[in-house]
Amino acid sequence: MDTIDRQEQKSRDVIDYFYLNRDDSSEEWNQKFQPIMMEITYYDADDREGNYKERELFRSIIEMIRSSAQSVTVFVESDHIDASYTDTYYSYFSGLHYEPIKYCKRFSFFQGEVKLKYFLKKEKHEMLQKSLIGTMVIRPLKYGFIGRTLLDPGKVLAFDSKRSVYLRTATFVQHILGVEFTIDAFPFCSQDSSFMTCAEVTILNLMEYYTMRYHAYKRILPSDIKSLSQRYQYERVTPSVGLTYLVVSKILSEFGFSPRIYNRESIMIHSLVGDERENEIKRIMHYYIESGIPVAVNVEPEQGDFREGHSLLCIGHSGEMDLERAKSYAMIGRNEKHAVINSADFYVQYCIVDDHQRPYEIRNYREMSTFSDMKISNLAVPLYKKMYLEAKYAYDIFYRIFRSERLGLARWEIPEEYLSENDTVVMRIYQASSRSYKAFKVAAYDECDLYRKGEFAQLEFPQFIWCCEFFTFAQYVHEDRKAFANIILDATASLKHDYVGSIIAIETVNKLFKKERNYPDNKLIRVSFWKSDGSAENTLLSIYDRNLKNCGG
């Protein structure tokens, strides 16, 4: 036996592994996991009582992994220390008469057949990184045994080749047998119903994402959430009975955000679009999702139903579009040639992280929860402190500019080949960081567009901007989607009434209207783009696509 084989034999004392094939039945997969799970979670696949729902959730996650590759290698680490569970253990479980054990197990999933000795060979590490599907912590609890779970959506959603999913992820670092790996994922875990319920889990998953995505936010543990809950609640917080979204918002503000709450019943029906409140709050959610901002969603039963509500996270949307639904919401004013569609109205399927459903589940916005007859009641949007211009006011400003005789479509002089007289116009609204957006715009223009590239490179941007891209209906639904115009607003301004004051630039196929800091009276400077022969240079605009990651088909 050589050195590598001896080391592999020693490693099996602390970590075990087994292979699974997609052609094996679901029952065969479950039989592999059942004895391991029973060691610490009271897991019994035949037990129809107790934690039956969570066991079904576990099986659905395993089925998701099963579909991601022809074969999967599962590594099982015993005596794994998980920071969140350890914090919960010493804050709560260690004080119970029948306390659970302190250590967890962790599953690591790899595509294909992987051997333990590969971890000892440096030349195999790149292959291991490429084949890593994700990890799942199993806590020693009967209820809430699914701990921190990180699954790469690019792998677990890729099996559905007909469905594109656009979502937000962060890069997490995981160490397996001393080898460092990275996983692009959105964190998931289940609630234990004692120390952590759905609202606390929502905050924990959200903060885990922001901690790994941005350096401005620190790592948060369950006890940190509990400490703040106690400060803003008027009763004990352990065992947990849940949190209202007012308290959720206050906790997020303590963690460095400037959150905005939207309530379905109190939201004003849009001043420019007569529509039901349910669709209006869905539109607001979509603007933030399109901006790459995960949104905490509170779903509640209809009035008169006294069941408790539920909390989950919305992190993306399906690429599937409902064209007829969008057309039904088209609006056109008196004496106006172009009907306008809000791009949010194309989408009804959203990607969520919910402790009652497997990660990255796609749900209709009217049925986000598995609980029956629950609809969106509240949104908590974790905004950065300098994002002053909120979504609904940004929409108002974009629409007013578009219809303005002084600044809008009438002044843009769009050639008929890009916008004919009776074309329906689609508006796509999102927020972006100026650094990312400017880098995208400069890179989007090739060497033939040096003048346009130079103009954008020299534009002065605040830290965050709101953008609205304009398309014809045909341009928007085209596979190679490109816009005929784009408006850029200052997201750090709160000028919801002085809409001209928040404009940074208006770009069309052949013009740029820009504002310079020292130019008087908020006037825009017009710049036209010309070819060397003196004719207008018309170029459809590439759409900004860096807020969400495309997974799935």
Image (spheres, grey):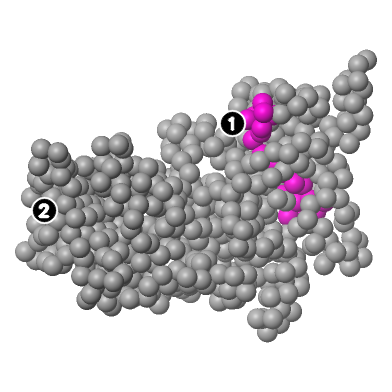
Please tell me whether residue 368 belongs to the stretch shown in magenta. no
Q: Nearer the viewer, mark 2 or mark 1?
A: 2
What residue is shown at x 83% (from left), y 61% (from top)? 89
How crowded pointer 2 is (Cα within 10 Å; few <14, some 14-19, many 20+) is rated as few
Of residues 154 and 495, which is closer to you in this image?
495
Residue span colored magenta: 126-146
Please tell me whether residue 138 belongs to the stretch shown in magenta. yes
Q: Position of residue 36 (x, y in %)?
A: 82, 38
Q: Secondary structure at mark 2?
A: loop
Of residues 363 and 307, which is closer to you in this image?
363
Most distant residue in the top direction:
1
> Which of the two labelled residues, at mark 2 and mark 1, occupies the earlier sequence position?
1
Could you tell me the amino acid type at mark 2? Glu
Could you tell me the amino acid type at mark 1? Ser
- Residue 280 is drawn in which quadrant? bottom left
What residue is shown at x 86% (from left), y 50% (from top)? 103
Disc tally is: 2
Instruction: Look at the image and tell me whether residue 69 can be seen.
Output: yes
Judge from the rendering whether residue 166 lies leftward or rightward of residue 48; answer left or right: left
What residue is shown at x 49% (from left), y 33% (from top)? 160
Mark linked to residue 413: 2
Q: CA distance from mark 2 to mark 1?
A: 50 Å
- Tell me if label 2 and label 1 are in contact, CB under 8 Å: no
Instruction: Look at the image and tell me whether residue 341 can be seen.
Output: no
What residue is shown at x 35% (from left), y 48% (from top)? 441
Relative to 70, does residue 160 appear above or below in the rendering? below
- The residue indicated by pointer 1 is 68
**Considering the image in quadrants, where does the C terminus appear?**
top left
Judge from the rendering whether residue 494 lies leftward or rightward of residue 272; answer left or right: right
Relative to 25, does residue 523 appear above or below in the rendering? below
Q: Position of residue 310 (x, y in %)?
A: 57, 64
Q: Position of residue 354 (x, y in %)?
A: 58, 54
